[in-house]
Amino acid sequence: MTDYTLPTVWEWEDANTNIGGNRPTAGSRFKQKLPVGDAPFQVYSLGTPNGVKVTIMLEELKEIGKTDVVYDLYQIHIGEGDQFGSDFVSISPNSKIPAMVDQSQTPSVNIFESGSILLYLAEKFDAFLPKEIHEKTEVLNWLFWQVGSGPFVGGGFGHFFHYAPEKLQYPIDRYTMETKRQLDLLNKILAEREYIAGDEYTIADIANWSWYGQLVLGDLYDGAAEFLDVESYPHVLKWAHRIAERPAVKRGTTVEYQPIK
């Protein structure tokens, strides 16, 4: 029970003017000049689950011999509000990482949202996305499933379990239940196939491993793996461990970021 009374019209009462904090308005907050290197791909990101999707994908493409996959990687400090600068917002209007610019095209192409970047790279390099319609659709089913389901894990479970200043049972119960339902679904799927969308490793695995794989391996939110009883999802664990051993995944999750200022 709380003493909160639902207002007729919600108003933002946070007087904190910290540039890094979220607000109920979109758009840039300050002038910014992002560095731009010479590599074909300019990546502005951070090593979060959504961020590592892109670096893993780029490293996987290099691993299979795509020699023209060269990128500059810059760190966007979301806690310091870098994502609200004018240059970053011009690439990613939603002020979320990751964002990427493909300079090999004329004019250059801005891509934002992790799922969009994975799909863009898969199509550009004809890799990790089948051509056959049934197989391709199954990959896209699970790619977009992760994009839609992930916020329940991150903004829901992760926030209230790990980041919220006060532990509240209702939201923790709600989002823990949903996270476990998602893990149970993946466990059932992975009991029948080696990878998320079938017998081949695809962008669906990259997207899902970055969240659920790291979650069950204990690499997201201290104590969450035990709290969620991840041992009860053996097929997810087996899949997560197998992907974690891939050389490109190891590189993609440990790659160094350049500062933007």
Image: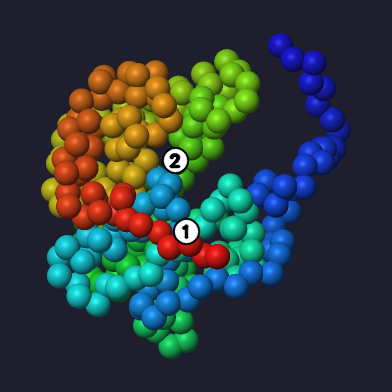
Q: Between 33 and 178, which is closer to the camera in this rendering?
A: 33
* Residue at mark 2 to residue at mark 1: CA–CA distance: 26 Å
Q: Which residue is mark 1?
A: 75
For residue 164, the mark is none
Amino acid tagged 1: Gln
Q: Residue at x 47, y 58 (%)?
A: 75
Q: Residues within 10 Å of mark 2 (few under 14, many from 20)?
A: some
Q: Is the C terminus in the top left, top right, bottom left or bottom right quadrant?
A: bottom right
Tell which circle, 2 or 1, labels the residue nearer the N-terminal end.
Answer: 1
Observer able to see residue 137 = no
- Which of labels 2 and 1 is toward the front? 1
Observer able to see residue 29 = yes
Disc 2, SS? helix
Query: x%, y% of residue 6?
Result: 81, 26
Left or right of 189: which side holds 80? right
Q: Residue at x 50, y 40 (%)?
A: 151
Disc 1, SS? strand
Q: Which residue is mark 2?
A: 149
Amino acid tagged 2: Ser
Marks 2 and 1 in Cβ contact (< 8 Å): no
Q: Is residue 167 above or below residue 240?
A: above
Q: Residue at x 30, y 43 (%)?
A: 209
